[in-house]
Image (cartoon, helix red, strand yellow):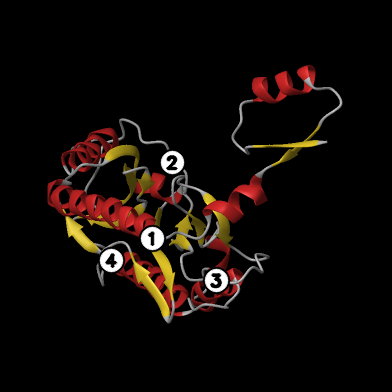
Amino acid sequence: GEIAVDDDMPAHMVLGLQRALPSIRLILGHELRAKVMSLKDKDELAALHRAGAAADGAWDEVRPKIRAGLTETEVAKMLQDAMLTRGGKPLFSIVAAGPASAEPHHGSDETLLREGDVVICDFGCEVDSYISDITRTVCIGEPTDEQKRVYDIVLRAHHAARSAIKPGVPFQEVDRAARAVITEAGYGECFIHRTGHGVGMNVHEAPNVVEGETRSLQPGHCFSIEPGIYLPGRFGVRIENLVTVTEDGHLSFNLEPAERMLSVG
C-alpha cells in the first residue's frame, strides 16, 4: 500500500514511518491536500476577510510611524504588535530597507532605515485559523523618479494580473499577465519569483500563480498577487494583496495599494 505524507512533515517522522512500515510506499500528499483545501467556503472566506482586515489596520497604524533611524526589526515589531491588537496572531513580519529591499526573502535585522531608502514590508497574521499576507512598499523621504517609475510598473503588473482573474482561466495566465507588463517595461529579468501562491490555513498552499500551472481558476480559490521588481544592490518593489475568485472575477481581501509610492518618515 501507500501512505501520503504532508509536504511539511519533519524528516525524522518520515524516516520513522519508513522504519516502522518498511513495506509501505510513502508518497507526497500535496495533491490530495490541495484538492481538499484549495476551494474555500463562505465561512473560510469570512475568516480570510477578517485576517486581511487585521493586516490592513496594522498597516494604516504603522505606516505613518516609519521613519529614518528606526531599525528593520523595530518596524517589524510595530507591525506585529498592531496585528495583535486587532485580534490577529502575528505569523511573520519582514521589513527590508535600502539595498535589502532587492532581496525577495530578506530576513529583517538591525539595519537602520535611512533617508532615500525604499522599504518593503511583508507581513501577515492568523485569525480563526486563516491567514493574511500583504506587502506594501514605501520610501523614506521623497522617492526618486526611478523609484516612482518602478513602483508604477509593479502596480500596473499587479492590476493586470488581477484583471485576468476569471473562472476557467488557467493560473499561469494570471502570472503571464503580470509578467508581460514588467517585461514590456524592460525589467523582465528583475521579476524573479512567481506572481502568487495559494493561501488559507497555511500561508503557502496550492495551486500557485506561476507558469506551468494549467489548472483553471474556480470560485473559492484564494491566492496572493505579488509581482515585484528587484534591482540588486539598489532597491526593490513588491505589491501584494490576497484575492479570491468569484463567479464574475475576483474580490480582494485587502484594501487597495497606494496609487503611487508613498513617502514616509
The CA span between labels 3 and 2 is 30 Å
The CA span between labels 4 and 3 is 23 Å
Between marks 4 and 1 in the image, the one whose residue lies nearer the viewer = 1
Label 3: state its secondary structure. Answer: loop
Q: Earlier in the sequence, mark 4 or mark 2?
A: 2
The CA span between labels 3 and 1 is 15 Å
Task: Report the quarter where the N terminus lies.
Answer: top right
x%, y% of residue 18? 78, 23
Residue designated by label 1: 242
Q: Earlier in the sequence, mark 3 or mark 1?
A: 3
Q: Tag 4: Cα neighbours inside 10 Å, few (<14), some, or many (≥20)?
A: some
The CA span between labels 4 and 2 is 21 Å
Give the numbered dot on residue 117.
Answer: none
Residue designated by label 2: 106
Instruction: Say whether marks 4 and 2 touch (CB < 8 Å).
Output: no
Q: Tag 3: Cα neighbours inside 10 Å, few (<14), some, or many (≥20)?
A: many
Q: Is residue 105 left or right of residue 71?
A: right
Label 4: state its secondary structure. Answer: loop
- Give the amino acid type for the residue marked by disc 4 in the picture: Pro
Seen as rendered, the residue at the extreme right is 23
Residue designated by label 4: 257
- Give the amino acid type for the residue marked by disc 3 in the picture: Leu
